[in-house]
Amino acid sequence: MFTTPETASRRYEDTTVLIGEYLAHDPREERAVKAIARMNYLHSPYVKSGKISNDDLLYTLSVFVSEPISWVGLFEWRRLTDLEICALATFWKSIGDAMEIDYAGRLKRSTWKDGIEFYEDLAEWAQHYEAENMVPVASNKKTADELVPLLLFYVPRPLVPFSCQAIGILMGERLRWAMMYPEPSLVVYAITYTILLLRRFVMRHLTLPRIFPLVEFSKKDPKTGRYNHNSY
């Protein structure tokens, strides 16, 4: 669905909303339960047809565990604590369970004493999966070519060429190679990392803690029954 202009934006928005719903609400709340059920419903025909494998789902789960930990460690104002990593991995393990992802024969262990053990097993497995499966294919580039413009929708036109290269940097070497994107210039590397490190400094030393909680989605509209983004 990411491979055509007609469906890419809808898929992007649907994914954002569904994941946001079960991230933002208690797992026992109706909104979280419905979001997980809807996600499974959307995946089910692709899983049944074999277009999405169990390993594909497991790898995607690993990205949601590993990437925040990596990103925060590199670019946020502090690293995650072990307790936060444990909580993050435990949460996503519960999502994997709700999706009926099979871990048997893939991860080192069949049971884990805590979220950190699960994270370590999952990250190790994901590295092997990437080495075997993350390779250049024309469909990868087609998908990226539809998704990147969505990410740059609000970027001023003069900055789009730079931003495209910056996205290539954030992809990382392996993903960029698999997506068949060119190596960004050294100048763009320098500017991108300077911006990110300056942001980290400002967040650590020059900003106050958030006063009010960040609420991404509205309550249900009594007339339409729909939920909406509070910001775009």
Image (tube, grey):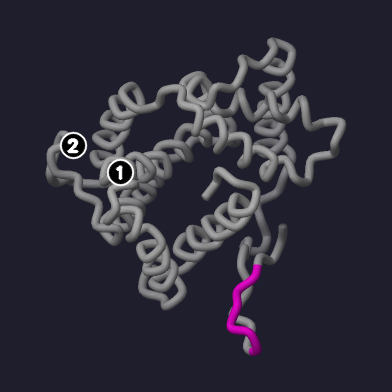
State how far apart marks 2 and 1 are (Cα): 9 Å
Pointer 1 local density, CA inside 10 Å: few below 14, some 14–19, many at least 20 = many
- Residue placed at 64% from the left, 83% from the top? 221
Pointer 2 local density, CA inside 10 Å: few below 14, some 14–19, many at least 20 = some
Q: Is residue 60 magenta?
A: no
Q: Is residue 224 magenta?
A: yes
Q: Is residue 82 visible?
A: no
What secondary structure is marked by label 1? helix
Q: Position of residue 172 (x, y in %)?
A: 52, 23
Where is mark 2, residue-wise? 106
Location of the C terminus by quadrant is bottom right
Counting residues from the N terminus, which is met first, the one under dot 2 or under dot 1?
Answer: 1
Q: Which residues are magenta?
A: 223-228
Q: Nearer the viewer, residue 191 or 36?
A: 36
Q: Label 1 is placed on what type of residue?
A: Leu
Q: Nearer the viewer, residue 70 or 129?
A: 129
The disc at residue 58 is 1
- Residue placed at 18% from the left, 37% from the top? 106
- Residue placed at 50% from the left, 28% from the top? 138
Q: Label 2 is placed on what type of residue?
A: Arg
